[in-house]
Image: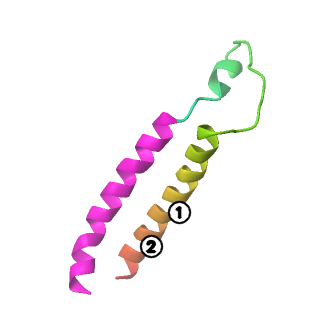
Amino acid sequence: MQQFEQFLPYMQIIIAGLLVAVILLQKGRGAMGSSFGQAGEFSSTRRGPEKHLFTLTIVLGIFFIGLAILNLLI
């Protein structure tokens, strides 16, 4: 158990880095541009790699929050 407590912060740092990378890889929706007067793009569903990146973002976010709560409880 002692080894897991020492390894937990490093796991959080790795997951945080992966989460930032996956978020930056996602295609922007253009919401800010349309709110400032730029032409809006058409809306479409996520397909292919974009859908996988979106799912991976959700999974990494849940895993990160779970690790944070586990870090608080230990």
Q: Position of residue 49 (x, y in %)?
A: 59, 39
* Total marks in image: 2
Q: Position of residue 71 (x, y in %)?
A: 36, 74
Residue placed furthest toward the top: 38
Left or right: 60, with 28 as reference point: left
Mark nearer the N terminus (2 vs 1): 1
Asked whether 2 or 36 is in front, the reply is: 2
Callout 1 secondary element: helix
Residue placed furthest toward the front: 48
* Above or below 37: residue 12: below
Asked whether 37 or 61 is in front, the reply is: 61
Callout 2 secondary element: helix
Residue 62 is marked as 1
* Above or below 70: residue 45: above
Q: Residue at x 64, y 43 (%)?
A: 51
Q: Residue at x 31, y 56 (%)?
A: 13
Left or right: 29, with 59 as reference point: right
Asked whether 8 or 53 is in front, the reply is: 53
Residue 69 is marked as 2
Q: Residues within 10 Å of mark 1 (few under 14, many from 20)?
A: few
Name the quadrant containing residue 6: bottom left
Q: Amino acid at mark 1?
A: Ile
Q: Amino acid at mark 2?
A: Ile
Q: Residue at x 75, y 37 (%)?
A: 45
Q: Residues within 10 Å of mark 2 (few under 14, many from 20)?
A: few
Q: Position of residue 20 (x, y in %)?
A: 42, 44
Question: Magenta residues?
Answer: 1-25
Asked whether 65 or 51 is in front, the reply is: 51
Q: Position of residue 31 (x, y in %)?
A: 67, 27
Q: Are marks 2 and 1 in contact (CB under 8 Å)?
A: no
**Quadrant the C terminus occupies:** bottom left
